[in-house]
Image (tube, helix red, strand yellow):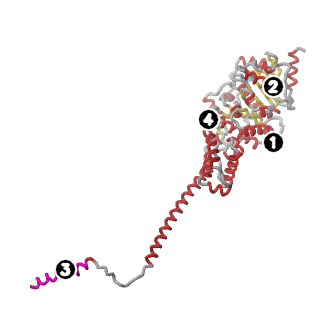
Amino acid sequence: MSQQEKFFEYINSGYTTKGDFINLGAAMLGEQAITNAFVKVPLKTLNRHGLIAGATGTGKTKTLQVLAENLSDKGIPVLLMDVKGDLSGLAQPSAGHPKIDERHKVIGFPFEAKKFPVEILTISKQNGTRIRATISEFGHVLLSRILDLSEAQEGIMAIIFKYCDDHKLPLLDLKDFKKVLQYITNEGKEELEAEYGRISTSSTGAILRKIIEIEHQGGDLFFGEKSFEVEDLTRVDENGRGIISVLRLTDIQDKPKLFSTFMLQLLAEVYQTFPEQGDSDRPELIIFIDEAHLVFEEATKALLNQIESVVKLIRSKGIGLYFVTQNPNDVPEDILAQLGLKIQHSLRAFTAKDRKAIKLAAENYPNSEYYNTSEVLTQLGIGEAFVSVLNEKGIPTPLARTLLRAPMSRMDVLTDKELAEVINNSKIIHKYNQEIDRESAYELLNNKIESSILAAEKAKREEEFQKEREKFEKEKAKQASKPTTTRRSTAQDPLVKVLTSATFVRAVFGVLGKLMK
């Protein structure tokens, strides 16, 4: 048996599946692809998570596109984090190309161009179906970890949520939360301390500053109503194909705090909502996180621990997470160890540090008698990758240098007109894009403060009136206490005084005397 025949048997036996699968392409021996030596991913193991890594321009996004297309064809819904903005082309068929036909002939099956059902989502100002969540849905634990609060600050956060629950103050958006913080440090300080104990104003100030940081990164658009229902990510179209939800994130590359906040909340919501299903024959939902380093690069230790816990537990809900990044080192080791499917595109070695990184990346893959892994990692062509998956028994398959199949949809973005058409055809956009600002903590506390001010002014007016009344009563009583007398006043009227004066009398008699003469 020749080496090529031996290799063919090696791959076919290693990638044999009893259940349904996705065909990624054909295994390569050296620089040559072996026709019909198919590299298959069992649907049963897709909830074991995965990694797609490789340097810029090596084909990571196209590999992601291929997986999303085939999952959709199998009736499995997909959520894609589109950070670079080049995944909208899934909604239109590929234009085709002779090189694509040639590639598929080598792989062993013909190329078929087709489009897929796409839903455009957004958490920013971009057009699309809006995803929101309320502060209450986060809860004090998750919000504290996202904000990287100290133990004392986390305790205050728990008190704030308890206070709002006890006083029927809905926490929906950031302005609600900021209003509560301001209230408990000013007008409501005595009320809060009487019920829950004293809190530090310096700690509430620190929490407020971190809330403002999230707000400046666009959190005011994400927090609020109407909350997105994660069940809408698991829809299928009228032909039974899974909906591919493309979350456009091109304008938040410089806002990692918002991105990690959204991701963790989404994963937590999915975990809490979806029922346990254990190991089933197919996943319920596959989530691809492109530019995954944005999730981890500014994550705190507490946040990383939370993500690690979610990754470990969420697979039992039938959810698969796939991290797409340039270097496997971008993903923390504890999370990397949980990933069953690994697709490694070429890595570049320009420095000693790069060479060490490549050697380390090679150790993440099974040993193979057919490849010097660390050496081949720098020689992989565009659209080629090392692949290792879990078979249906959960055992890693043989490492295969793979010539990957081409995407069936367009390998380019949609035009503005095409994008608008996809968005307008959405069946859920009217459900989530309506503006809702119902009465919540912000309005209720403002009313409470206004009522307190009016009550204080009324009390002040009543107090002033009472003082005047008392003054009047005292004056009245004083006048009433003076003794009364019947003697007429000895004080003469000025006119009477003049008329009765001696001078006036003499003058009158003088005049009368003259008249009588």
Q: In this figure, which residue is indicated by the disc labeled 2?
A: 363
Where, by quadrant of the figure, is residue 512 drawn? bottom left
Looking at the image, residue 355 lies above or below residue 183? above
Q: In this figure, which residue is indicated by the disc labeled 1?
A: 276
Q: In this figure, which residue is indicated by the disc labeled 3?
A: 503
Work out how far the residue at label 2 is from the one at label 4, CA to CA, in angstroms: 43 Å
Question: What range of the chain is rendered magenta?
Answer: 495-517
Q: Which of the two discs, 2 and 4, sits closer to the camera?
A: 2
Q: Position of residue 368 (x, y in %)?
A: 85, 21
- Name the N-terminal-most of marks 1 and 4: 4
Task: Please report the residue visible at 46 percent of the width from the left and 76 percent of the height from the top.
Answer: 477
Where, by quadrant of the figure, is residue 454 drawn? bottom right
Q: Is residue 511 magenta?
A: yes
Q: Give the amino acid at mark 1.
A: Glu
Give SS at disc 3. Answer: helix
Indicate left or right for 376 with 483 as reference: right
Q: Is residue 405 magenta?
A: no
Q: Position of residue 412 (x, y in %)?
A: 66, 25
Q: Which of the two discs, 1 and 4, sits closer to the camera?
A: 1
Indicate left or right for 133 with 375 as reference: left
Work out how far the residue at label 3 is from the one at label 4, CA to CA, in angstroms: 109 Å
- The quarter of the picture where the N terminus appears is top right
